[in-house]
Amino acid sequence: ERAPRKTKAITPIEDCREVSRRGTEARRWLLFLATNYFTMAMKPPFRYPYAQEVKGAGPFVIGGITTAMILAEALFAAPLGRVTDRIGRKKVFYLLTPVYCLSYIIFVLAPSPEWLLLAGFLMGFRMLSYVAYGAMTPELVPRDCIGRWRGLIGLSLGLASIPGPIVGGWIWENLGPMWVFIIPILVELFIRMPLLTTVPETLHNSRMDA
C-alpha cells in the first residue's frame, strides 16, 4: 500500500504569489479587469434614472434600452467569437472600445428619448467584449493554476465592484448626472487601453495548445 502523500499547507497569499509568478502579467490583467468591473458597477443604478429624469424617456424606451442591449449581444456573439479566434483577443477589444465609448456619448447627448434605443444597442457591444476577455483570461496562466486564478479574479472583481455604486452616487450628486457615464469613458481610454498594451496577446498560446 502506498504511503500517504504529505502536502505542504498552502495559504491564499501563497496561492496569489504563485499565480502572479507563473502567470503572464497576471497583476496587470487583474487591474485591467477590476477597473472594468468598478465602472460597470457604477453605471447601472443610474442608467435608467438618467434616461427618465434627464432625457424624459418613458417606460417603452426604458425597457427598449435593455432589449436593444440583449439584441446586440445575441446577434453578434457568435461572429465575434470567430473573429476573436482569427485576429486575436486584444484586437477585438480595440475594435469594440470605440463602439462602447460612442454608446455613452449618444446616451448623454441624445437629443430625444428615441436616440437612447440606439445607445442601448451599442451598449450591448460592451458585453460582447467579454468574448475576448473570457478567451484570454485562462490563457495567461498555466493550466494547473486556472482554478486559483479564477478564484483570485472573483475576489478582486468583487472588491472592485463594491464601491462602484456609492462612487456613482457621489458623482451624480456632486459633479452632475452625465459624469457618471463620462468618467467610465475616460477610464477606458486612459487607463484600461494603455494597460492592455502591456499584456501580450495570447492567441498564439491557444494555437500551440491545440
Image (spheres, grey):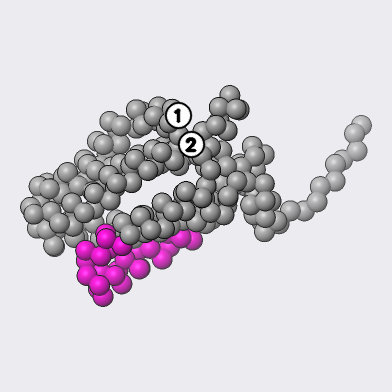
Q: Residue drawn at (29%, 70%), measured in percent from left and top?
A: 171
Side (left or right) of 194 relative to 170: right
Instruction: Classify mark 2: helix, strand or loop.
Output: helix
- The answer to which of 162 and 198 lies nearer the viewer is 198
Label 2 environment density (alpha carbons within 10 Å; few <14, some 14–19, many ≥20): some
Q: Is residue 132 magenta?
A: no
When asked about the image quadrant of residue 17, the answer is bottom right
Q: Amino acid at mark 1?
A: Asp
Q: Residue drawn at (25%, 69%), measured in percent from left and top?
A: 172
Q: Residue drawn at (17%, 44%), measured in percent from left and top?
A: 118
Q: Residue drawn at (65%, 43%), measured in percent from left and top?
A: 145
Q: Which mark is residue 85?
A: 1
Alpha carbon separation for disc pair 1 and 2: 9 Å
Where is 183 relative to 149, above or below?
below
Side (left or right) of 158 relative to 110: right
Q: Name the residue furthest top.
A: 210
Question: Considering only order in the chain, which callout, 2 or 1, is on the residue closer to the N terminus?
Answer: 1
Q: Which mark is residue 206?
A: none
Residue at the disc numbered 2: 135
Query: Taking the image as drawn, is residue 147 in sight?
Result: no
Question: Do tag 1 and tag 2 residues touch (Cβ < 8 Å)?
Answer: yes
Image location (x, y in percent) of residue 149: 59, 47
Q: Name the residue furthest bottom.
A: 174
Q: Amino acid at mark 2?
A: Ala
Instruction: Classify mark 1: helix, strand or loop.
Output: helix
Q: Which residues are magenta?
A: 158-183
| Prevailing secondary structure of the magenta residues | helix
